[in-house]
Image (cartoon, helix red, strand yellow):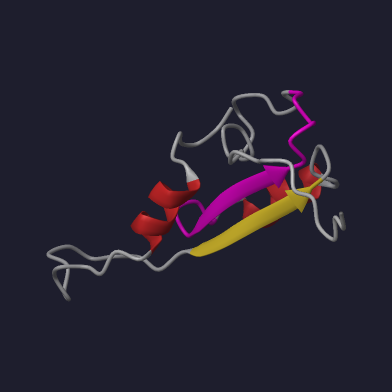
């Protein structure tokens, strides 16, 4: 399950947006982002669940698995559920 349907250009545009206001009218809590680059399911997921427990709202989680990994391994109660971001196959050092 992907978190969004944006293509690379849309993601780049969103990442480079400059805020129009410098001070928000509400209190903003800083967050830390965690990106899991993995070939499949997250190793030691139960350990990570314990690591994040009690700190809800202070982090964002993104899972970037290999595009060939299509299994749904996390139930809806998991902190990893619905955190997958779209992946594309990548070829590096492909000499023609």
**Taking 93 as reference, is 31 left or right?**
left
Does residue 79 lie above or below 10 as drawn?
above
Instruction: Residue 27 in the image: state x and y as whole percent.
Output: 23, 65
Q: Nearer the viewer, residue 56 or 89?
A: 89
Q: Residue at x 70, y 28 (%)?
A: 74
Is 68 included in the stretch rendered in magenta? yes
Instruction: Residue 83 in the image: state x and y as whole percent.
Output: 58, 39
Looking at the rendered image, the quarter that the C terminus falls into is: bottom right
Q: Residue at x 65, y 41 (%)?
A: 87
Q: Residue at x 85, y 46 (%)?
A: 43
Instruction: Residue 38 in the image: state x and y as whole percent.
Output: 79, 48
Q: Nearer the viewer, residue 15 or 55?
A: 15
Q: State which region is magenta.
A: 55-71
**Taking 6 as reference, is 51 left or right?**
right
Q: Residue at x 47, y 60 (%)?
A: 58
Instruction: Residue 53 in the image: state x and y as whole percent.
Output: 62, 50
**Taking 87 as reference, is 56 left or right?**
left
Residue 80, quarter of picture? top right
Q: Nearer the viewer, residue 94 or 29?
A: 94
Residue 25, quarter of picture? bottom left
Is 54 included in the stretch rendered in magenta? no
């Amino acid at each position: 399950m992907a978190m969004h349907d944006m293509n690379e250009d849309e993601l780049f545009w969103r990442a480079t947006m400059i805020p129009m206001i410098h001070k928000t009218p509400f209190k903003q809590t800083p967050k830390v982002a965690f990106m899991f680059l993995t070939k499949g399911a997250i190793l030691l997921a139960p350990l990570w669940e314990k690591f994040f427990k009690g700190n809800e709202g202070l982090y964002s989680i993104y899972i970037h698995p290999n595009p060939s990994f299509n299994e749904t391994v996390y139930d809806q109660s998991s902190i990893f559920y619905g955190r997958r971001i779209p992946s594309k196959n990548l070829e590096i050092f492909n000499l023609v």
